[in-house]
Amino acid sequence: MKNIISSYDFTRDEIIQIFELATKFIREPRNETLKGKTIALAFFEPSTRTYLSFNKAIINLGGNVVGFSGSEGTSVAKGENLADTVRMLDNYSEAIVIRHKFDGAAKFASEVTDKPVINAGDGKHEHPTQALIDLFTVYKNFGTIDGLTFGILGDLKYARTVNSLLRMLTRFKPKGVYLISPPQLRARNEILEELNYPYRVTSDIIDVIEDIDVLYVTRIQKERFLDELEYEKIKESYIVNLDLVKKMKENSIILHPLPRVNEIERKVDKTKQAKYFEQASYGVPVRMGLLSKIMGE
């Protein structure tokens, strides 16, 4: 068993193995891989999809769940520090899934427990299990990840899902990636320096939309801005509407890690390119595949 802190904690073969397990769990959603085991969910930051899908995945695998979603009602509200909370959960579980508002919280947690730690999102750092779901959706729709052109649109500076997706793509051979954002929200240099595939930074979605197979849309992360006026200036920089979808390739797809605000118009939901609800539906089987993989070794 090992920690999952970053997308770099997976090899290409391991990602494909998780995809194969997830495909099996879509057909057969019950399994006893975690029978007799307890997994702790330590969600210090609000979450709906990630918390519930991990919870459901553990139950489907025959395991038990302890933990919390939100620090209210726990000793954290009294001032207990992260290390002590993790050490307490260590006593009650075989693995810890953690979500936290601070970068590096998952890595820190892994250093104070011998149990496997899974990063369910830490600050603006990473969200590797979401990247698994994102690429699984691509894999299910195209049968491959190699050779495709990706367009990643929106907040590329603060969105941890973007960091994890860009890093997980280094395990594959995309034809190229367009990084589309306002100048203030461009991907950070420390991320760009790690990429081993062609990419292009741009602010113009119209200029590249006809070339994209997978359009990955992210919301502007209001909670990461120190100055709300700066958020107000750029909060509606991009809105995916029907006019934009008409310019896309016939077999292209649109993904979004959700929740969305107004960056994708509701009318787009009915187009064949809209795959973000299908993407969300894969949360449980992909996390079942992940837990089976790391808890079964």
Image (cartoon, rainbow, N blue to C red):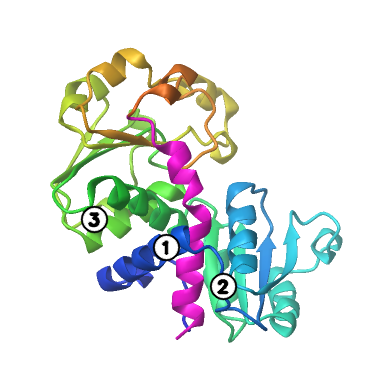
Cβ atoms at labels 2 and 3 below 8 Å apart: no
State the image quarter where residue 61 is shown: bottom right
Identify residue type, mark 3: Glu
Q: 280 left or right of 62?
A: left
Q: Nearer the viewer, residue 89 or 252?
A: 252
Question: Circle 3 sits on which residue?
Answer: 193
Point out the frontmost of discs 3 and 1: 1
Question: Circle 2 sits on which residue?
Answer: 108
Region of the chain picked out in magenta, as a range: 273-297
User: Marks 2 and 1, Cα distance to the nearest angstrom?
Assistant: 29 Å
Identify residue type, mark 1: Ala
What percent of the width, then of the height, locates residue 273?
A: 32, 30
Cβ atoms at labels 2 and 1 below 8 Å apart: no
Residue for point 74% across, 53% down = 70
Q: Nearer the viewer, residue 206 or 111?
A: 206
Which tag, 3 or 1, sits closer to the chain's start? 1
Residue 100: in magenta span:
no
What percent of the width, then of the height, locates residue 119?
A: 52, 64
What percent of the width, then of the height, locates residue 100?
A: 62, 58
Q: Is the magenta region chiefly helix, strand or loop?
A: helix
Quadrant (top left, top right, bottom left, bottom right) of the C terminus: bottom left
Q: Which mark is residue 83?
A: none
Is residue 188 shown above or below 223? below
Q: Which mark is residue 22?
A: 1
In the structure shown, which secondary structural element does the residue marked by tag 2 occupy?
Answer: helix
In the structure shown, which secondary structural element does the residue marked by tag 1 occupy?
Answer: helix
Q: Nearer the viewer, residue 206 or 77?
A: 206
Identify residue type, mark 2: Phe
